């Protein structure tokens, strides 16, 4: 498309006023993109930026709000819980997601069925899925009932409103974000490579370790980063099923806004956003991740 | 050897069970006859659906959600489709900046977007109005429209547009008779995604729906803080069914578009 | 419908096309990267002209400029004497068949073929009649209701042709239209293109990298190389009288013999090659002592000791050693080496009556002056 746009500019540079019909067409892409860009700037980007600015200009221009974070015990504990939860959840997703991705790619007639099972929860709202775990993990929930029936516990144990509940529910919610990029990478592996490996005397396990796993690393990296970044910002699930004292960064931000403590909320938001963007910036440098990201975002 | 092939299959099965089971449980609970949450239900009935459909406290937020989502669909699909058409033809540097801005709501933590919007919209007295919900949700829905339309645009052979021009179609006629019909499935898929995005959205709603524009997720959230009554299971099941139906439609549309495309190119190859 | 295509001036049903000093540079910074570099061509009304060249030779870019999808950096394109450079593609009224056909997948065959008529506001009934006529022309009557994906590659190609001629353009451009088809089908369609050209009487400009296709179909061929026209001429001209080494090597197979000019007699150059005096046709007058290259076709060479019934032994002779002998069905192909190390290919029609040469055998080859060109 740019090839078509270029000649017109060339013609102009040569200073021959030919091809007037092409001149206005060069402006068309800008005109088409402008309304949405304007919309996003005014109704999304500027509001977020204005809010974030409260962290450095309240009441005067200063970085004091960031400096105090260094001694802020509440922030540090919250930040630690957030990172800790995200790491745990990401690892959990990786362990559970990889076999499913392999199953999805390997399965022939079952593949659409597996895909539906993966995608249905994917598009069910976070709220509904968190609610489902409230039902399952409650004091008289199914999990407790099952454990009682099996004789593994004598009386109902507390699962709901503990960090474990948060982790289980978040793994459940984020698992598709891990599965899809990995499945994408696995699908791109030339099957003849696997046949070649076994033809060369490699056992299935060796083939997996030496051929499949290395070739799927771009998908693993993309899935891991995506899962981690999304986990960092979780709010609804930890608020619904997590423990009352296990507050994530998002929850702390919401609390501060409720108390109209905008400077502090903005500072925390900036830290959360910067953490997410830093991870993504690192991720873009990894080969293959950029592409895997794009396809998995669809 | 046999164990090795059965074992992964059963592991995959268990994980898939983990994925599907909670949703199935919600659906089953919604048909419970009990007045409290218990599983398995002692008997089945539709009392929670009746409770939902007879209670204006539930129906009103449902209508708000539907209207907001429909308005978001119109706005996001229109703006997003135009932008996708433009962005594909922008110079590369500008394309990256524009795509970065438009796609960023997928990555920026929801709470940051929500309080940013709350912070600015409250200045202009928009909080608590359905208009604010539409404006904010459109920002969140637009990335799905743009990615979907961009994907279907990139699948179009540029020679089709050249062919139309060579056959005497003006650029306008080329757009309406060739380009638009070819990206139509992508536009529809984007519109469906936009609907679901708005319909399911909670974090922004928590901050800006106020008392004047309480949406269905917001109503569920408020309810959950006091009790876990099976009405929510019924509401959840209804939203799951709605979402699944829309996603199924999107999937079929995409499949059909792919088939049209691959069939022509494979006959050529 | 009579108004749809025949609004141009000029004689006959076909348009004449004049390219003058056409240039196309994609990269503004380096003028060296010229995709098309000073192409001038006069394409006559009703002619079947093929632009032949390897990929990257500028043939497709030239075609795209004629169609109006690319704007020339410099130079001019005139159709029937009128410059069209400033005219957008949809006003040029040129039919075009694309590589891979570019049939609209969302339209039926009928709608595809009717598309250009619809753009021109042809009424529905008239449209249906013309579409049926065009489908008849390409031997696809009754296929109107199908979608492109339900057709084979060859059928899609015919629909693309029907769509490009249904509005009776005076000029038809074709960009490697047979490239995606298998050999058998390609050969059938080549003949059909010729017939179509004869039936319609309009000007065809055809782009291909396949020299056999070009030789079979064209009235004239413009051989393109490096953005320039290497030679324009009839297929016979190009094959028998290549003007330069590129054309000699690109069209058919050629032997290149290094030689030194010893004298000129009328139109014939006498040059010394490996100690032998070889006569060659030459339009120019090279000076004595100049180093030159002589070219000749492998199938025009013979072994001097073959029987020459009813014809004279040709004048040019050279002593060689057989280094390789390959039997290839209808022909025997010999690799020979001259005394100065030059490799020469000779193709001899195979016959049980002709003795096969063995590797290492010494022999003398002969060929006529008319088959020797100085390039």
Image: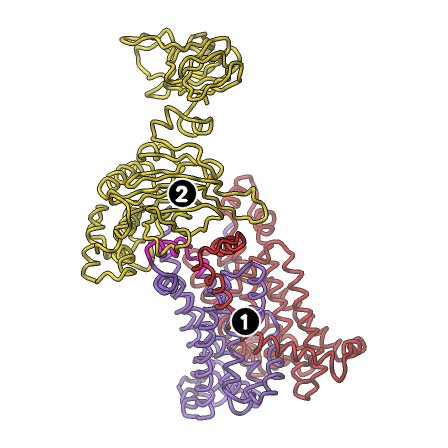
Q: Is residue A161 magenta?
A: no
The yellow-coloured chain is labelled C
x then y, percent, for residue A57? 74, 81
- Horizontal side of C172 relative to A189 (left or right) equals left
- Rounded to the nearest angstrom, the CA distance separating label 2 from label 1 is 44 Å
- Front residue of C36 and A126: C36
x then y, percent, for residue C89? 38, 54
- Front residue of C258 and C322: C258
| Chain designation of label 1 | A
The red-coloured chain is labelled A
The segment highlighted magenta reads: B153-168
- Front residue of B147 and C288: C288
Query: Picture quarter containing residue B115?
Result: bottom right
The image shows residue A139, relative to residue C154, as above or below, that is: below
- Residue on which disc 2 sits: C19
The image shows residue A36, relative to residue C34, as above or below, that is: below
Residue B3, can we see it?
A: no
Residue in the picture at 21% in, 56% down: C1
Q: Residues within 10 Å of mark 1 (few under 14, many from 20)?
A: many
- Horizontal side of B44 relative to C218 (left or right) equals right
- Residue on which disc 1 sits: A37
| Chain designation of label 2 | C
Q: Are marks 2 and 1 in contact (CB under 8 Å)?
A: no
Residue C207, can we see it?
A: yes
- Front residue of C67 and C351: C67
x then y, percent, for residue A282? 67, 60
The purple-coloured chain is labelled B
The image shows residue C126, relative to residue C283, as above or below, that is: below
How many numbered discs? 2
């Amino acid at each position: 498309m740019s090839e078509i746009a270029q000649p017109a500019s060339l013609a102009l540079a040569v200073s021959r006023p030919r091809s007037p019909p092409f001149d206005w067409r060069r402006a068309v892409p800008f005109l088409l993109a402008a309304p949405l860009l304007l919309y996003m700037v005014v109704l999304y980007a500027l509001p977020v930026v204005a809010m974030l600015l409260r962290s450095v200009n309240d009441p005067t221009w200063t970085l004091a709000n960031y400096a105090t974070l260094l001694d802020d015990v509440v922030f540090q504990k919250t930040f630690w819980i957030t990172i800790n939860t995200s790491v745990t959840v990401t690892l959990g997703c990786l362990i559970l997601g990889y076999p499913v991705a392999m199953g999805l790619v390997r399965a022939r007639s079952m593949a659409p069925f597996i895909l539906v099972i993966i995608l249905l929860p994917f598009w069910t709202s976070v709220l509904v899925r968190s609610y489902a775990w409230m039902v399952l993990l409650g004091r008289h929930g199914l999990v407790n009932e099952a454990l009682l029936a099996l004789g593994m516990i004598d009386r109902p144990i507390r699962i709901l409103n503990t960090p474990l509940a948060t982790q289980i529910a978040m793994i459940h919610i984020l698992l598709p974000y891990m599965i899809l990029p990995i499945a994408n990478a696995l699908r791109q592996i030339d099957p003849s490579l696997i046949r070649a490996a076994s033809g060369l005397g490699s056992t299935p396990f060796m083939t997996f370790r030496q051929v499949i796993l290395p070739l799927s690393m771009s998908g693993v990296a993309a899935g891991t980063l995506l899962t981690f970044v999304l986990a960092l910002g979780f709010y609804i699930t930890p608020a619904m099923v997590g423990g009352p004292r296990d507050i994530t960064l998002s929850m702390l931000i919401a609390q501060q806004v409720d108390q109209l403590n905008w400077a502090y909320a903005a500072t925390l938001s900036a830290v959360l956003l910067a953490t997410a963007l830093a991870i993504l910036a690192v991720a873009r440098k990894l080969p293959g991740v950029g592409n895997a990201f794009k396809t998995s975002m669809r | 050897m046999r164990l090795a092939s059965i074992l992964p299959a059963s592991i995959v099965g268990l994980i898939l069970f983990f994925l599907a089971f909670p949703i199935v449980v919600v659906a089953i609970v919604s048909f419970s006859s009990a007045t409290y949450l218990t599983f398995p239900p002692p008997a089945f009935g539709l009392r929670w659906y009746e409770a939902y459909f007879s209670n204006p406290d539930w129906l009103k937020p449902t209508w708000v959600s539907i209207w907001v989502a429909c308005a978001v669909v119109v706005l996001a699909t229109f703006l997003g489709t135009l932008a996708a058409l433009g962005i594909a033809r922008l110079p590369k540097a500008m394309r990256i900046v524009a795509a970065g801005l438009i796609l960023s709501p997928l990555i920026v933590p929801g709470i940051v977007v929500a309080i940013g919007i709350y912070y600015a919209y409250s200045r202009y007295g928009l909080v608590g109005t359905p208009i604010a919900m539409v404006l904010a949700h459109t920002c969140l829905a637009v990335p799905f429209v743009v990615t979907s339309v961009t994907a279907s645009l990139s699948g179009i052979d540029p020679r089709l547009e050249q062919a139309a021009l060579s056959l005497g179609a003006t650029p306008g006629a080329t757009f309406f008779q060739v380009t638009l019909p070819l990206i139509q499935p992508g536009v529809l898929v984007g519109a469906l995604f936009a609907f679901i995005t708005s319909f399911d959205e909670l974090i922004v709603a928590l901050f800006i729906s106020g008392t004047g524009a309480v949406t269905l997720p917001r109503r569920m959230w408020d309810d959950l803080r006091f009790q876990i009554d099976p009405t929510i299971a019924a509401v959840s099941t209804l939203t799951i069914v709605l979402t699944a139906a829309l996603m199924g439609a999107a999937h079929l549309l995409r499949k059909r578009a792919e088939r049209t495309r691959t069939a022509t190119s494979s006959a050529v190859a | 419908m009579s108004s749809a295509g025949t609004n141009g001036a000029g004689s006959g049903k076909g348009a004449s096309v004049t390219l003058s000093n056409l240039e196309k540079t994609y990269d503004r910074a380096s003028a060296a990267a010229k995709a098309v570099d000073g192409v001038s061509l006069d394409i006559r009304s009703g002619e079947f002209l093929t632009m032949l060249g390897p990929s990257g030779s500028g043939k497709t870019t030239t075609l795209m400029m004629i169609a109006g999808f690319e704007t020339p950096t410099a130079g001019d394109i005139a159709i029937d004497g009128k410059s069209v450079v400033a005219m957008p593609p949809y006003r040029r009224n040129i039919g075009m068949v694309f590589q891979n056909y570019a049939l609209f997948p969302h339209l039926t065959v009928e709608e595809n073929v009717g598309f250009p008529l619809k753009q021109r506001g042809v009424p529905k009934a008239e449209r249906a009649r013309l579409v049926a006529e065009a489908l008849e022309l390409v031997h696809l009557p009754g296929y109107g209701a199908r979608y492109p994906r339900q057709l084979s590659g060859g059928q899609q190609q015919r629909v693309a042709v029907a769509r490009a001629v249904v509005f009776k353009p005076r000029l038809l451009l074709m960009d490697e239209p047979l490239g995606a088809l298998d050999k058998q089908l390609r050969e059938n369609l080549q003949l059909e293109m010729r017939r179509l050209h004869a039936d319609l009487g309009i000007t065809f400009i055809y782009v291909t990298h396949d020299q056999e296709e070009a030789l079979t179909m064209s009235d004239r061929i413009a051989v393109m190389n490096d953005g320039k026209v290497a030679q324009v001429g009839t297929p016979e001209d190009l094959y028998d009288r290549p003007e330069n080494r590129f054309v000699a090597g690109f069209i058919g197979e050629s032997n290149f013999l290094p030689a030194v000019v010893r004298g000129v007699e009328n139109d014939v150059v006498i040059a010394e090659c490996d100690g032998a005096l070889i006569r060659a046709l030459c339009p120019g007058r090279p000076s004595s002592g100049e180093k030159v290259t002589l070219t000749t076709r492998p199938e025009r060479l013979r072994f001097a000791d073959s029987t020459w019934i009813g014809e004279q032994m040709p004048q040019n002779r050279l002593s060689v050693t057989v280094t390789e002998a390959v039997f290839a069905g209808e022909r025997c192909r010999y690799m020979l080496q001259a005394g100065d190390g030059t490799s020469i290919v000779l193709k001899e029609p195979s016959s049980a009556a002709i003795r096969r040469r063995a590797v290492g055998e010494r022999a003398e080859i002969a060929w006529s002056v008319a088959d020797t060109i100085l390039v």
